[in-house]
Amino acid sequence: MLGPPIALFRIFARRPERAQGIHGWGRYYLSRQSALGLRHRELVIDRTTVRCGAEYEWGVHVAVFAEKAGFDAEQIRSLVAGGPEDGCWSDPADRAVLRSVDALCETNDLSDDQWQELTDAVGQEATVDLLLLCGWYHAISFAARVLRLPPEPGTPAFDDCTRSTTT
C-alpha cells in the first residue's frame, strides 16, 4: 500500500502537534523497539480493532501486515469471527495474546491468572507493551469509527474473510 497517506493520517496531520505526538507513539509500537514482536503486535491490533468494530483500521492492518505476521486465511477469519480456542491457533503464546486482548476488551482488566499466562508466554515487558498497545488501538478505533472513514483502496472488509470460508 504505497501512495498518498491514508485518510486517518491525513486527519491527524491537520494539526501538526497532534501528528507529531502520534508519530512518536507509533514509531515505537510499530517498530522493532517494542517488546512485542510483529506477529503478537498484529494480533493485538487486529483483535482490538475487530472487538471495537473498527473495520477501517482492521482492513489497513490486514492488508499491510497480515502476510508479514504469518497469518493464514483461517487465522484472519478467526480474528473476526472466532476466538483464541479455534484450531488455527496452535501456538500457546498466540492464544495467550488473544485471550488477553479479549479480556481487556470485555473487562478492562486481566485476572492474576491471565496476567501470569501472558507474562509466561511473552515476557513482562511485552505484556506491558500489549496493555498500552491494546488501549492505543481502542483510541484509534474510536477515531476511525466516529469519523466514518471509508475503506482504503485494496483493504478487506470483515465480511470478506468470513464469506470466503462459509461459502
Image (cartoon, rainbow, N blue to C red):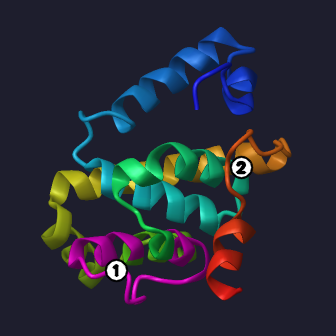
Mark 1 burial class by Cα count in 10 Å: few <14, some 14-19, many 20+: some
Residue occupying the point 50% across, 70% down: 73
Is 113 inside the magenta-drawn segment?
no
- The x, y position of residue 147, in whole percent, is 83, 41
Residue occupying the point 70% across, 67% down: 160
What amino acid does circle 2 point to?
Tyr
- The x, y position of residue 103, in whole percent, is 46, 77
- The x, y position of residue 163, in whole percent, is 71, 77
Residue position marked by numbered label 2 in the rendering: 56
Can you say which quadrant of the picture contains the N terminus? Answer: top right
In the drawing, does residue 122 fall left or right of residue 152?
Answer: left
Residue position marked by numbered label 1 in the rendering: 89
SS category of the residue bearing label 1: loop
Q: Are marks 1 and 2 in contact (CB under 8 Å)?
A: no
SS category of the residue bearing label 2: helix
In the drawing, does residue 98 fall left or right of residue 34?
Answer: right
Seen as rendered, the residue at the extreme top is 16
Q: In this picture, which residue range is highlighted in magenta?
A: 76-98
Q: Viewer-proximal residue, 41 or 3? A: 3
In the drawing, does residue 1 fall left or right of residue 120?
Answer: right
Q: Viewer-proximal residue, 159 or 97? A: 159
- The x, y position of residue 82, in whole percent, is 54, 83
What amino acid does circle 1 point to?
Trp
- How many marks overall? 2
In the drawing, does residue 88 fall left or right of residue 5?
Answer: left
